[in-house]
Image (cartoon, coloured by chain):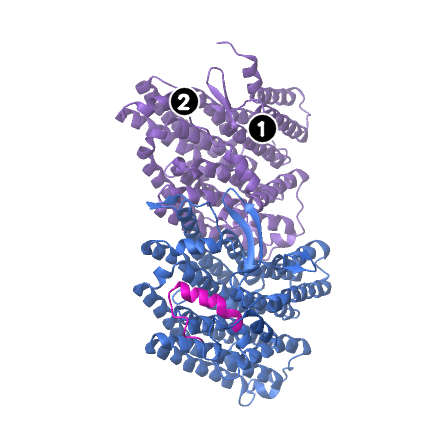
Chain colours: A purple, B blue
Amino acid sequence: MRVSATDWLLLSPELFLTASGLLILSIAAFFEKAKEEFLAFLTILATAITIGLVTFISGYHGHSAPILAGMFIVDNFAIFFKLLMLVSIILTALASVRFVGSAPYPGGEYYALLLFTGVGMLFMVSGNNLISIYVALELMALSSYILAGYFKGEIKSTEAALKYFVLGAFSSGVLLYGLSLVYGVTGQMGLPELAKLFATAQKSNLLLVGILLILAGLLFKIAAVPFHVWTPDVYEGSPTPVTAFFSVGPKLAAYAILARIFYVGFPSFHADWGLIVALVAAATMVFGNVAALLQSNVKRMLAYSSIAHAGYALLGVIGFQTEFGLWGILIYLLAYTFMNFGVFALVVFLETKGYAAESVSDFNGLARRNMTAAVVMVVFLLSLAGIPPTAGFIGKYYLFTAVMKAGYAWLAVLAVLMSAVSIFYYFRIAAAMFFAEGEGAPLRSSYALTAAVLICAVATVLVGVAPQPFVEMLRACVIQTP
Amino acid sequence: MQLMGFWIPILSIVTYVPLAGALAIVFLFGKERTAAIKAFATAVVLVGFLVSLPLWFLFERGRDGYQFVEKAAWIPSLGVDYQFGIDGISLVLILLTTLMGIIAVACSYTAILERQKEYYVLLLLLQTFMIGTFCSLDLFLFYVFWEVMLVPMYFLIGVWGSDRRLYAAIKFFLYTLAGSVLMLLGIIALYFYNTTGFLGYKGLGQPSTFSIEKLTAVAASMPVELQIWLFFAFFFSFAIKVPMFPFHTWLPDAHTEAPTAGSVILAAVLLKMGTYGFVRFSLPMFPDAITTEWVLTVMVALSIIGIVYGAMVTLVQKDMKRLIAYSSVSHLGFVMLGVFALNMAGLQGGILQMVNHGISTGALFLLVGMIYERRHTRMISEYGGIARQMPIYATYFLIMALSSMGLPLLNGFIGEFTILQGAFARSFWWAFFAATGIVLGAAYLLWLYQRVFFGEITNPANANLPDLTFREQATLVPLVLLALWIGLYPKPMFDVLRLPSEKIVAAVGGRTMTQPALARQPPASESGGAPAGASARP
């Protein structure tokens, strides 16, 4: 196979990011004195340049450009996810400065692994072939297992890594088995070819089993019930900036390939998987929200909350055959990335100030010690609960619209009631910050962390108050099916 | 609004003056400059009231439809507009809100001593969100204001409330939120019915819009079973906010635990959101649903249970604030009964009673707050013989209690009488049960008055209570004047409410003939806008 110049150009973001990761790894290996702040700065710089490259090729690709003989594709959908993921990497690096450096572990591998995870994610969202998607997914997953256990001296971090690895490997196996069944029946791996084939071909039971296994493998990655059990432990045990990253970055990638495979590849099977996804979404929303109600550990509570949010996002999957389905997911993920990262970034903030940030009571009296942090936290919590005028409301609005249009009114009712319930646990944090008495001097956050939090806050409010430019932009990012 | 050749977005100005004030406080005042913050907050609400006053004078009584309309595209991909505009119903509620804003700020000077900067910022934010709700002519925009309004109130109760404030704050938030999210689905359903259809209903194929005016027409054309579904989707959010029996349990907690200004705003304005919702949305949008017999029966039954049950529970309360809170359940039951009478007298009486309840119950909460500041207890048993020590206070309390129980010459009488007239036109029994509520209302208020104010001072702690200060009286006087004005000369109010009420009553197919007896209007066709407008000046 000949790799054309255009292919090289379209692959330039991934290639550059890989090179940057290797560079950071070598700097850390050969210059032991290299400061962690410097490595974080390099990471951010490299990611920013990658964002520039992605923006550059976004003008170049025309409608949608296949790369490497159709293994990958660069379309608006992929561009959107790439940009959002790269932003999430920058946010993670900002939140990690000092946090990682203050621990007795070198920063070099950390930032390199972060970038390698990023490379995997970038490839994933461009994947247009079941095999290329799988390989990219493994690249992302393997790097993230190590990130979860990065604080290897801490037993919880190790436990998180092990659980993540075992269950992640298992789910990858399920996914791979599903892929192999689909290949076995059809003899095809490319998503457009599969779609073309399915439009006319007979459905076979073996194929349906394959599709279900693929679905199960992907539901593992987005932590939907009943494949969610790894989430609370991994979120609790991982270093908090990594948790923040896990809750957005790899999830974005998983949603992207879920959308790519089921929207492009298997739309003709919607009738077969529609109801299953609806039941999974219902169970995920109910379980995530109810379990979060019962938690007093902040990180676990947020883990369950992110399970609940996976349920909301699945509403868009159900609405795939309506114009609001995929569009709604994109809007929702845009909102989710910033609001969820923002919340975790504020947990990081407390941890850098010596709190374990395990119990809600660590937030006690934060309003008196750092009013801005408390107000911004309330904005994130409102957005997570879907209260207007925040990004979270706009996102949920589109998802509810999609699921109503798709005819699942009962699911819409369940979804809105569950999002009302969620205010109960989200606002436990608000109550702790504003109502409870806290002691101590004012808390100041580092500049890097402040920047991360403010980026999230501005995005959350902006998308909520002036959604028009964003939703129009995202409408153009919906995958065009022929 | 045109002024000297310039177009002025007066409704936006009225709405956002408090928001601008809140931002100014956040960024310009340090938190230790409490005196300056108070003065500034007062100035902001005063300006807010002054800019809202022209609405009353410039509002054209005889003109059909919404006035002072402002419109701009907000989210064109969804068909959402930023659209403001008012009719007579929203007009009186907006004026009530801006007036209550002044009182809420003024009654907080000495009551709120902690975290004052945050307090006034939240109070001003709440003001903007409430006015915005009444001004919105776009359903999406309305929903945004409707929900975001909960946030400042949550913090007002939670930070500055009394002992069980945490419980009351989250209960308030959860209850009202749970109701409103169903309305969101109702809104989405309306949107689809207007455009592409959903759930087997063929849509009308019109361009997407959230305009309340357009969607009202669309909704009214829906098949009756869909109307009933959507009626109930909206019903829960409004009924919880009103609150109607059996959704009222959040109210006594929220009222009792909130700081005085919070209770005043809750009683005077926030509860009106629910009744306003019924009048603005439920009736004109789902006329076939509401005239379906079982739906109407359920609604009227809930209203009457609210009146009687609310009054009976009020009777046994030991805590003054809780007592007045429960009395709200009874009074709002009255309002709902008037609204569901589906005739002119009932509807106008109901709307007028919304205002009246805001004035009298707001004032009663204010009065309880004043004595609470002196004694730090709200238990009735702690008091007795207060009239000897605080005669001015006792007088104000008496006027407001009488207004609340519906004594002629005061505002409450006009509202209750007109509601009863409307209810009687529908059914003797509706009026009968409602009238029991009035009797019970007189009982609990007079008994409360007797226990608190009459007799000898038995509790030594009450022996040296200072009477009302000038500032405290200044917050009460406007309410007393309003109560007298509406009680003696309600015609201006009826003039403002007549046209929008006629439209609503016509929409539900009710008889527009049952005009309120106390309004004594010429038939609608003869009355022009100009004389009514001129006579509206007090």
Which residue is more in the foreground, B271 or B78? B78
Task: State the residue at coordinates (43%, 57%).
Answer: B179
The span picked out in magenta is B495-515
Locate residue B318, reporting x and y percent.
47, 77
Q: Which mark is residue A192?
A: 2
For disc 2, the chain is: A
Q: Residue furthest front?
A: B526
For disc 1, the chain is: A
Q: Is residue B281 magenta?
A: no
Which residue is more in the foreground, B212 or B432? B212
Residue B368 lies, with reference to residue B15, above or below; the image says below
Closer to viewer: mark 2 or mark 1: 2
Q: Is residue B514 magenta?
A: yes
Quickly name the residue at label 1.
A110
Q: Residue furthest top?
A: A2
- Determine the main secondary structure of the stretch shown in magenta: helix
Horizontally, residue B362 falls left or right of residue A321, namely right
Residue B215 lies, with reference to residue B438, above or below; the image says above
Q: Check disc 2 and report its element: helix, strand or loop.
A: helix
Task: State the residue at coordinates (56%, 36%).
Answer: A241
Whichever of labels 2 and 1 marks the residue nearer the N terminus, that label is: 1
Quarter occupied by the C terminus of chain A = top left
Mark 1 burial class by Cα count in 10 Å: few <14, some 14-19, many 20+: many
Mark 2 burial class by Cα count in 10 Å: few <14, some 14-19, many 20+: some
Q: CA distance from mark 2 to mark 1?
A: 37 Å
